[in-house]
Amino acid sequence: MLELVFTKILLFAIIGAVLTGFTCSLMGTFVVRMNLSSLGFAMSHAAFAGAALGIFLRKDPLIFALLFSIFVSLALGPLADKAKLKTDVIIGVIFSLSMAIGLLFLNMSPDTAMSSTALRILWGSVLGMTTADIMYLLIISVITIIFVMLFFKEINSILFDRKLARASGINDKPFYYLILFLTSVTVAFSLKLVGGLLVFALMINPTSSVYQFTYDMKKIILLSPIVGVISCLLGILMSFSFDLPTGSAIAIVCSAIFGVSVLVSPKRRKG
Amino acid sequence: MDKAIELHAVDTIYEGEKIPSLKNINLHVNKGEFIAIIGPNGAGKTTLLETINGLLESKKGKVIVLGKELNGDGNGIRKLVGYVPQDYSIDELTPFLVSDVVLMGRFGKIGLLKPITKNDKEIAKNMIDYLGISDLSHRPIGKLSGGQAQKVMIARALAKEPEILLMDEPFSNLDFEARKDVSEKLSHFHKSKQMTFVIVIHDIASIPKVCNRIIVMDAGKIIADGKKEDILKPELLEMGYKGIVC
């Protein structure tokens, strides 16, 4: 019986890791190329603050993480779009504000403050994956794949240059906001695996690693999710082997992959 | 004669600014015309092109392109209007290949949820060949020289097979030979397809021979508009067209 439970937990952890790695890294290709890193960073910390509010209210942290993350994407998207805010300002304000709000809510929840529940949303808890978590991740993965497949022309064009895409007759704004929206939902659903502080690493590092090997955006879109999945699986293996927090292990693995990619990148070879 | 472009008392103001970059512009361009816009830096030439294709929204007046008034985003019209941006700079690490960038020129025209066909790829390839950049086809766009990138942008705009082609200093990075070659190719394209061409140009010597009308701009206004032989008179050029409003 115990073995069966353990197998189920392990299976859920692996499926969760595959789905999280896939979706985060796929959305990461857009985030990196469109210079939305600061927005993604803001979203992941807003999701953390939202989850903390959920804990404080004794409600499902995921719902509040989702709401906060989506709110940030909807509020900051148009602001960043019009370039009224510098990326440093976005990071500075949202990061400090969301961390402050998050910690405030955790502090106001006496029985949970800095407890395992709180730490789980900060660093992730792959062993706590439920059927519902897997379903959410599966749904967002499928939606993201359908989005990319249906609108590959438009997305590719916008990733090259938004203004030129607009000049060629593509209505870029809905795609831009949809990318922000899907990024925020992905961030919120990924909290369970890597946690609010490290979800961003899973978005940026796999894409940045693949960037070191090709100039072909199609290949980057195809390979980044594969690197993301490998990072997550290796991270889980490392986490189980050395009894480390899963989020940290995944972030270490994908950072190491990035570091090696930079070192061996053919783009940096001279001659 | 059918009008390709009509601007009626148009003012364009950049966001956050108070002084219009274009002031009371009235312009009519017939279908099939090849016109050049000249003028000093900051005269409003680029603003005029981007007001015509709706990338910039006019704050006053009326812009009519191919019989349709530009309202809001103007995506429908931009599907029929090609655009070559000024001195397009591309980051060295940009992960796109030349062939993909040229093909992208057709994406707006192909439309949502419609697949890229063999014909689309064929047209893009033909334009790459036409501009003489076949050898660059599979190279990353960011690795090209300014002149090569400029040719790619022209190929991209032509691949769209637009009804109107707006070009913003398309020869600025080309050497003398390349300038002559591209100018002849554009002239040939214009003649064979009967397209409307509007070209912003700094160097008067580079104005293609086929160009039959010149517009002179200064300080956001059109200060002269007429046949090439009338406008490019040395005495008029010398006095900077002051007081000559056509």
Image: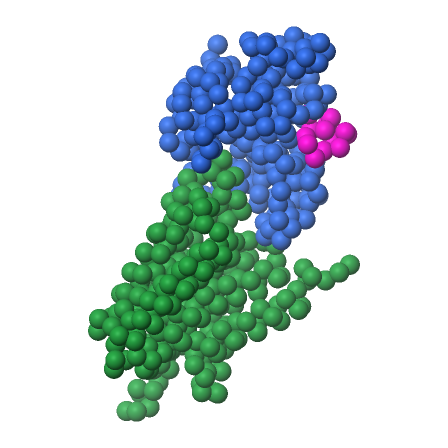
Chain colours: A green, B blue
**A167 vs B196: above or below:** below
Q: Which image quadrant: the C terminus of chain A?
A: bottom right
Q: Is residue A2 magenta?
A: no
Can residue A74 be seen in this snapshot?
yes
A73 and B94: which one is in front? Answer: A73
Can residue B7 be seen in this snapshot?
no
Residue at screen point 48% across, 78% down:
A249
Residue at screen point 22% across, 71% down:
A57
Please provide the residue range marked out in magenta.
B171-183
A29 left or right, relative to B228: left
Q: Which image quadrant: the N terminus of chain A?
A: bottom left
Residue at screen point 48% across, 9% down:
B1
Query: How many marks can you see?
Result: 0
Q: Main secondary structure of the magenta part?
A: helix
Q: Where is residue A130 in the image (x, y as percent from the top left)?
A: 29, 75
**B174 vs B220: above or below:** below
Q: In which quarter of the image is residue B156?
A: top right
B61 and A194: which one is in front? Answer: B61
Q: Where is residue B204 in the image (x, y as percent from the top left)?
A: 69, 20
Residue at screen point 60% across, 17% down:
B216
Q: Position of residue A101 (x, y in %)?
A: 33, 67
Q: Is residue B178 magenta?
A: yes
